[in-house]
Amino acid sequence: MTQPESGARVRSLSVQTLRGSRYSHGTPVCRQHDVASPASYLKIFRHPAHPKLTLTTTSLAVQAVPGTRIVVYRPTDEVTRIAIGKLLTGDGADEHFPCWETHQQREAGLAAS
């Protein structure tokens, strides 16, 4: 192969690689099944400032990296959405359940032994 021919071949392979990369638009990741089908679950959390936080999770397994999952939490109602917003600003973040002090003392005892 001459110099111009080899340069054209490298450019052609580079373009093919970019078009077929996992990061391009219309990526073959889904065609290769590197991302598993999503699974959704309803989760209910308790917080001392908000007795019931109801969220839906969507979990995606990234099979190209074994053991890796992406989980997205979405509020299921307006009350939860507002509560999460308040917690994110720090409102209620310092509140504790009545048993918190007992657990802190037990944890300190376990750490000391």
Image (cartoon, rainbow, N blue to C red):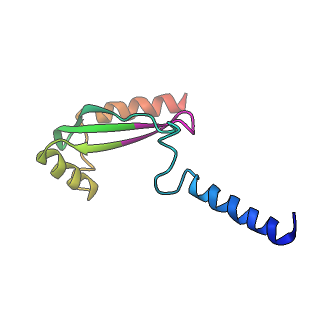
Q: Quadrant of the C terminus?
A: top right
Q: Residue furthest right?
A: 2
- Residue 36, position as x, y percentages in the image: 44, 34
The structure residue drawn at horizontal position 18% and vertical position 41%, both measured from the top left corner, is 76
Q: Residue furthest bottom?
A: 4
14, above or below 45, in the image: below
Residue 74, quarter of picture: top left
The structure residue drawn at horizontal position 25% and vertical position 41%, both measured from the top left corner, is 96
Q: Magenta stretch containing residue 73, yes or no?
A: no
Q: Is residue 62 left or right of residue 90?
A: right
92, above or below 66, in the image: below
The structure residue drawn at horizontal position 47% and vertical position 39%, both measured from the top left corner, is 35
Front position in the image: 103 or 86: 86
The structure residue drawn at horizontal position 38% and vertical position 37%, both measured from the top left corner, is 59
Q: Quadrant of the N terminus?
A: bottom right
Residue 4, quarter of picture: bottom right
- Residue 15, position as x, y percentages in the image: 63, 62
Which range of residues does the magenta coloring cover? 60-71
- Residue 105, position as x, y percentages in the image: 39, 33
- Residue 69, position as x, y percentages in the image: 46, 38
Q: Is residue 42 left or right of residue 5?
A: left
How many numbered marks, from 0 up? 0
